[in-house]
Amino acid sequence: MLPPSTFPLSRLATACRRLCFSAGVAALVSSACVVPAYADIGDIDNDGIADHLDTDRDGDGLSNFLEQSAGTDPDVPDQTDLDGDGIPDSIDEDIDNDGIVNQRDAFPRDPSEWLDTDRDGIGNNADKDMDGDGILNRFEQQLGYDPLNPRSVPADSDGDGWPDALDQDMDNDGHDNQSDAFPLDASEWSDMDGDGIGDKADPDIDGDGISNELEKQVGTDPRNKASVPDDFDRDGRPDVLDEDMDGDGVANAQDQYPRDSAESRDTDMDGIPDNQDPDSDNDGVPDVFELHLGTDPYDAASRPADLDGDGMPDKFDSDRDGDGYDNRLDVFPDDPSEWMDTDGDGIGDNADPDRDNDGFNNDIEELAGTDDRDPLSVPEDLDKDGLADVVDPDIDGDGVANEDDAFPRDPLEWSDYDQDGIGDNSDIDGDNDGIANRYELQLGFDPFDENSTPPDLDGDGIPDALDSDIDGDGFGNAMDEFPLNPLEWHDLDGDHIGDNSDDDIDGDGISNEYEILAGTNPADAASVPSDIDGDGIPDVLDDDMDGDGFLNDADAFPMDINEWSDLDGDGIGDNADEDRDGDGIRNDWELTLGFDPDDASSTPADLDHDGIPDAMDDDIDGDGVANGDDVFPRDPAEWANLDGDGIGDNSDDDIDGDGIINRYENQLGTDPRDASSVPPDMDGDGIPDALDDDRDGDGVANSKDVFPDDVSEWADLDGDGIGDNADDDRDGDGFSNAIELAAGTDDRDKTSFPDEEGPVLDFVKWIDGPALQGMVYDDGMGVESVWLNAPDGDFCRGTLVYTGHFRIDCPQMQNSPRWQLVAEDKAGNKTVQWVDIPDAD
């Protein structure tokens, strides 16, 4: 460390001021940064450094600045620093220097501990069970569980702290898991019969089916499966104690077969036990039938009925009368002589003379070839007299013998006059002359004489005297205007020509053919095609519809007899058009001015296109201002020029010519038509000051211009009220612009100023760590870095801990007895000081 005499007081004073200025500690400026007169110099810690220059006045290893920050007295050596890092504990964020800030350190004053997961007061580094779940950390890690998570815990059945996976006796019953049949049940450990029930709770230890208690009663060993008493029915009760040895539900005393569980008696004493004997009472009927029929299979006197004596009870006999027909098909199942009754009359077919009950004896049916067993198969009997046709002399029963009857099988007919195959009784035209019998009788003609026939014009079989449509044209005589002409029946227009032959059916003057072509109705006088010229040719077919002598194709108005041409194509015929050539000028005005009214290219001038030639127009440009009052008589958009600049007021941006455009004046409330009403414009750029972003015209916007009304100034870097262009010291660092320019520093950066002297080192000492700490000041732009160099080449880089203080951690401190301490400022100036390690001579 350099003695105080080596530091010029003027440099220390300057460094002190710059240190305080750069630290921004306003409260300390008045006390710690004021250099007193030399006569008041004191030295509390007697270290040879005057108190006003000493950064650690009380010599307790903590700078005055830190002590004042911590609230302790910088003149009394009483501040603690547990980790000896030069930072008082009261402001040290990591008091024990374990790398964990105090707020997160469960043991802020113990550098070996900082966490206590289970909050048991033992730090994790020393706690064998960090999460307090009862299992040691090493066991949890071994088994893959999280020793810091109490929810991540291996099973421990007996709660002895040994996880089951590592515990040789998991249930703690004194029996090793491998030899313990129930390693998780402290009350059981063996299972002789392997039935899953521990021997202590098993009622049959050896699993021989006999309980331990009964084995003891009969004298067998309950723990030896080979030692087991007889138990015929395997009901778990030894035979010597069992009242029903075979377990058939019959006591031994009443059981004829006490050791046969399937038998207990023999009713008929035939030597066959009842359960094996098919006829226990030996009555000839099997037990199974008797059981079904309700008779007693163990009583020979109790037997079911058997009609045919075949040994099969009637209840189960499919042919109980033994006639060969199944009961289900036998109408008389209890009569062996009958089995069918075709007609259902209660008489068996073998004894019934009319088996199918169709009214015909079986013998007659056989003669007629019909089926005497089918009521639907009967002999023919046309007249239903009970005699089959095969034996009936008058088959149809009409009283005429078959041989004399033209229709022997038709009771309504027996003769046919006209031999047409239709009996006379039903023939409507008995003589076949085409006129019905009733018409002939009505008119006095003979219906059975083909030569006696009334007139019939249309041959429809109705005599004319009785025919409502004599000519047969489909129109009744009363409605037929031509009742005796089958080709005509109507005369629509009353011209006595039938419509079928009339060229103009409706008499409207247009032929039927033209009406059809024109799409109108030729049978409707009200449906008439248009015929403008009345020549009888519909317009749609007429080459000259209006009859003006001009064919339709050449006629501009083919339906107007008064017009046929339209020179200008305006839809108005030339005969009625006031402007035939469509040039916008009336025919009579064109003639007056010597132009051709039939030639569109021969047109007088008309500037405003109002149809009045300019030579006759009072307002040539049509702007509503008479020519005599219009400054621009041929410009429809202009008529006035207030400022006389030759630009019409309507298009002039500055109507009054005062240099400010109209919209600015309107916006600011001045009169754009009054040259004496003008808003202020400092820079004369035509933009009023109230709207001008750069009202002094210096190229800097008002919002960024410190002097918005001074064209020569716009910035004030040091805020001294003098514009930079006129300020000799723009950055206010105390050095003129010229000096900074000569020195090569930035005259616009107050932290850049001439600096030719290196930093000042003070209060340098070694501390535990190992590390070197101290204070460093610079009267220029500030300290850039500090480091240590050893003669042998070792290097340790330092850090600026806070304003004016540095620390250099140097693990290789003992490699050299002396080290070179170097401090460099931001201007590149260096200060070098040699320091010795504490135990070196």
Image (tube, rainbow, N blue to C red):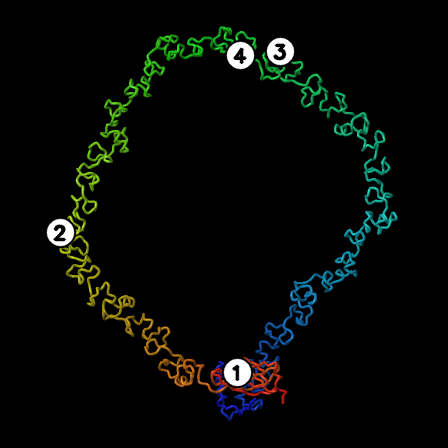
The kind of residue tagged 2 is Phe
Q: Earlier in the sequence, mark 2 or mark 3?
A: 3
Q: Is residue 817 above or below residue 521?
A: below
Q: Earlier in the sequence, mark 2 or mark 1?
A: 2
Q: Secondary structure at mark 1?
A: loop
Query: CA separation, marks 2 and 3?
Result: 135 Å
- The residue carrying pointer 4 sits among few (fewer than 14), some (14 to 19) or many (20 or more) residues within 10 Å by Cα, namely some
Residue 33 seen anywhere in this rendered image of the structure = no
- The residue carrying pointer 2 sits among few (fewer than 14), some (14 to 19) or many (20 or more) residues within 10 Å by Cα, namely some
Name the residue nearer the viewer: 612 or 650.
612
Q: Earlier in the sequence, mark 4 or mark 2?
A: 4
Query: CA separation, marks 4 and 3?
Result: 20 Å
Q: Secondary structure at mark 4?
A: loop
Residue that carries the numbered disc 2 in the rendered image: 595
Q: Earlier in the sequence, mark 4 or mark 1?
A: 4
Q: Secondary structure at mark 3?
A: helix
Residue that carries the numbered disc 1 in the rendered image: 804
- Residue 840 is left or right of residue 660, and the answer is right
Residue that carries the numbered disc 3 in the rendered image: 363
Residue 644 position by quadrant: bottom left
